[in-house]
Image: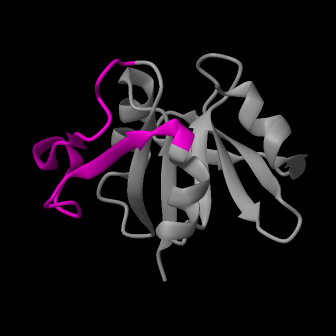
Amino acid sequence: MTIRTLIMGAAGRDFHNFNVFFRDNKDYEVVAFTATQIPNIEGRRYPAELAGSLYPEGIPIYPESELQDLIRKYKVDQVVTKKNVPLEGVKILSYDYEADAYTYVYAYKSGSTWTYDKSIYTAARTDLESRYK
């Protein structure tokens, strides 16, 4: 079973994270990117030519303001976003609908290997989302 993933962000680092970890990774299905940084990118697609063979139609890009609707629409298992500290990796999140909270771990890339922090963190959805607006 693949992990349905949404990537918060639709700019250089977000696309880079997709390409080095998710592209051609059959364990994950990236259902969408969300955008805040680049004007007028919403409604476009990350091109199929760059997305790889698992995404022959490309990957849609939506406004980040639609995040909660997208999580429900695509039945997202995890949301991925940049970590606060540059060059340390991505933050992997899962959403608990009943608690309205995210649970997340830190992921770091060392060479060609991804390592996941053993600590598990939880934060209220509104608190965590406000950090990345």
Q: Residue at x 44, y 24 (%)?
A: 13
Q: Position of residue 37 (x, y in %)?
A: 44, 19
Does the magenta run of residues contain 47? yes
- Figure label count: 0
38 displayed left or right of 119: left
The answer to whether one can see residue 10 in this image is yes
112 displayed left or right of 58: right
Q: Position of residue 34 (x, y in %)?
A: 45, 40
89 displayed left or right of 99: left
Q: Residue at x 49, y 83 (%)?
A: 1
Q: Most extreme residue toward the bottom, as rendered?
A: 1
Does the magenta run of residues contain 51? yes
Residue placed most toward the observer, 85 or 42:
42
98 up-or-down from 78: above or below: below
128 up-or-down from 116: above or below: above
Q: Residue at x 66, y 49 (%)?
A: 92
Q: Position of residue 9 (x, y in %)?
A: 48, 33
- The C terminus, quarter of image: top right
128 up-or-down from 78: above or below: above
Residue placed most toward the observer, 41 or 8:
41
The stretch in magenta equals 38-65
Residue placed most toward the observer, 87 or 111:
87
Q: Position of residue 108 (x, y in %)?
A: 63, 37
Q: Residue at x 85, y 71 (%)?
A: 98
